[in-house]
Image: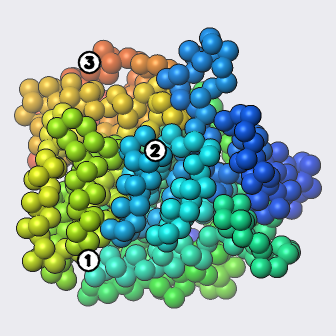
Amino acid sequence: MATKMTKTSPAAAPVEVDRSRDISQPLEKLAPEERLKFNSDYLAGSIAEDLIDEITLAVDENNNKLMKFHGIYQQDDRDQRDERRLQKLEPYYTFMLRGRMPGGVCTPQQWLKMDEIGRTYGNEQFRLTTRQTFQFHYLNRTALRDVMLGLREVGLDSKAACGDVARTVMSGVHPGLSKLHKQVYEQAQIASDHVIHKTSAYEEVWFGEKPAQPRGENEEPFYGKQYMPRKFKIGFAVPPSNDIDIYSQDLGFVAIASRGRLKGFNVVIGGGMGRTDRAPETYPRLGDVIGYIDVEQLLPTIEAVMGVQRDYGDRVTRSHARFKYTIDDKGLDFVTGEIERRLGVPLAPAKAFKFTANGDQLGWTTGDDGLEHFTLFIENGRVINRPGHPLMDGLKAIAETEKCVFRLTPNQSVILSDIAPVDRPAIEALLAEHAITNTPQKGRSALRLNSMACVAMPTCALAMAESERYLPDLITRIEGLLEKNGLTEEPITIRMTGCPNGCARPYIAEIALTGRAPGKYNLYLGGGFHGERLNKMVRENVGEDVIMEVLDDTLARYAQERQPGERFGDFVIRAGFVAEVKEGRHFND
Ligand code: SRM
Ligand code: SF4
């Protein structure tokens, strides 16, 4: 790609800044969530008391919001919702728990614990997410403490996996560049430890611990009582792979290396995916590269960037509270200048880098340190046993050998990594024994291997249409079109979400579908293959017949008219299918 480098002037003239919506305002003028956080006793609320209520399956509304900071969402089974309503029963409430796993690195012992929890409490399954971590669904309220204790036994937790804080820090996984990847991962881990909230509420609520000392004003030296205005996402990419979709992160770091050693990072700010249909003031936005820092500057830079969003982010209107809107409201120059002022030095000019893809490099690879890695495609991240496909059992058996590290990828898949060459045959035998290959059950097109769907139905409260349960079948039908046009081996990214929130980062896929209503989707085309360009809506609120018609036409034309090496997303723009797509940073429809 053409590297995006936005030069900013550290000496930009002072900008008049509207501070009517930021944290300097009196609490009563801010969103209700700000008052909730402020009065929550640093996130403890009355969650502990709520957990022992025996009358309902649910928790109180405020605790429900606070529990997100502890990695937990109350949900109800949407497949059962109507029937239970007819029977005048309360919804069938269960809980989703999302773990924190910086860079997706998971020891075999941790994998075994996830497997055990999934089997015991989580409907015999668990889910790998688009941010390299894991989720359990279908947990009963009474199981939550046991799950927390289980995670703690293996050094895992669910702190800050959700809520208005810095979330699980992502770190790109490039198996061929093992040494560099390890150095970048170390920095991601340091960053994660640094940004995690410091309150001891988690230990008190879940493990009954007493605070070491009464909580005082210094409980959260960085966040304060109101934490961030909204979620904040940080990720590290290792070129040439843009697997973490750096341009979708609030704050991204592109690793810059010299002779295989990490030197520093280009800093990218202001990415985000979420939008709402018929609300043009919400939009996905690609991050801007604002400069370069040496490795030593990492933590001060994170503090400076997050500090700007903490202090200037919108605390009145939550739908406008992400960093991308702060940047667009105040201006990139102002925000960059403020970051540099807090850093005390200007950022250096960004260094050149090149991405080639945002998917995973599947199959066996040997790292630059001689260790072997097997990247396994897991369709939509669901770890479960299905007839003839005992994926969960197979991965458990592999974990039991303790011969590999599990690395969760940003594409909901897993790398069995750091395998000594002598151990590879044993791993291969277990893969074969459990019929685990990179040939998914329903077909093996390069399109499927570059697909992602968010969870959506039946657990996600915000889903308007199916996603994970539908995309595999839709792809089977699209595979007919691919075969007809000789495109089965052509890598094309396709992503689906059950609503416009963008959890599978759809707005940077070459083909994307976002749910509007049962069976109805917005269809987008024209994203960049390495996550460098937003796509554009080409059909609104349409069903499968129209989706197939448009894809039939565009794929046939692509097969016949493409130039050598031309990607599908680039072609649909050149050919005029998506007239309005530009290299723009953001769009609203
Ligand atoms: Fe997400 C909310 C699932 C990655 C943007 N997301 C949700 C909730 C918690 C629904 C809710 O609030 O009640 C979903 C839970 C569904 C379920 O049943 O499990 C949910 N998001 C997911 C996951 C599990 C999708 C997946 O299939 O893997 C991903 C978990 C990531 C993780 O491990 O932390 C997930 N969500 C994302 C991403 C992608 C990313 O971060 O790289 C995005 C777009 C990037 C961004 O944030 O801009 C994303 N999720 C959202 C939004 C829209 C935020 C916004 O700015 O408008 C919501 C809704 C909200 O926060 O109000 C949301
Ligand atoms: Fe739920 Fe929407 Fe996210 Fe899908 S994109 S998991 S439907 S919030």
Q: Which of the pair 98/218 is nearer the observer?
A: 98
Which element carries disc 3, helix, strand or loop? helix
Q: Is residue 243 left or right of residue 58?
A: left
Q: Is residue 568 left or right of residue 330?
A: left
Residue beneath disc 3: 549
Q: Which of the pair 62/555 is nearer the observer?
A: 62
Q: CA distance from mark 1 to mark 2?
A: 33 Å
Q: Residue at x 31, y 39 (%)?
A: 494
Q: Is residue 392 visible?
A: yes
Q: Residue at x 32, y 43 (%)?
A: 384
Q: Which of the pair 218/434 is nearer the observer?
A: 434
Residue beneath disc 1: 178
Residue type at mark 1 is: Ser
Q: Are marks 1 and 3 in contact (CB under 8 Å)?
A: no
Q: Earlier in the sequence, mark 1 or mark 2?
A: 2
Which element carries disc 2, helix, strand or loop? loop
> Residue 57 appears in which quarter of the rendering?
top right
Q: Earlier in the sequence, mark 3 or mark 2?
A: 2
Q: Is residue 326 visible?
A: no
Q: Residue at x 69, y 79 (%)?
A: 342
Q: CA distance from mark 1 to mark 3?
A: 43 Å
Q: Residue at x 83, y 62 (%)?
A: 41
Which element carries disc 1, helix, strand or loop? helix
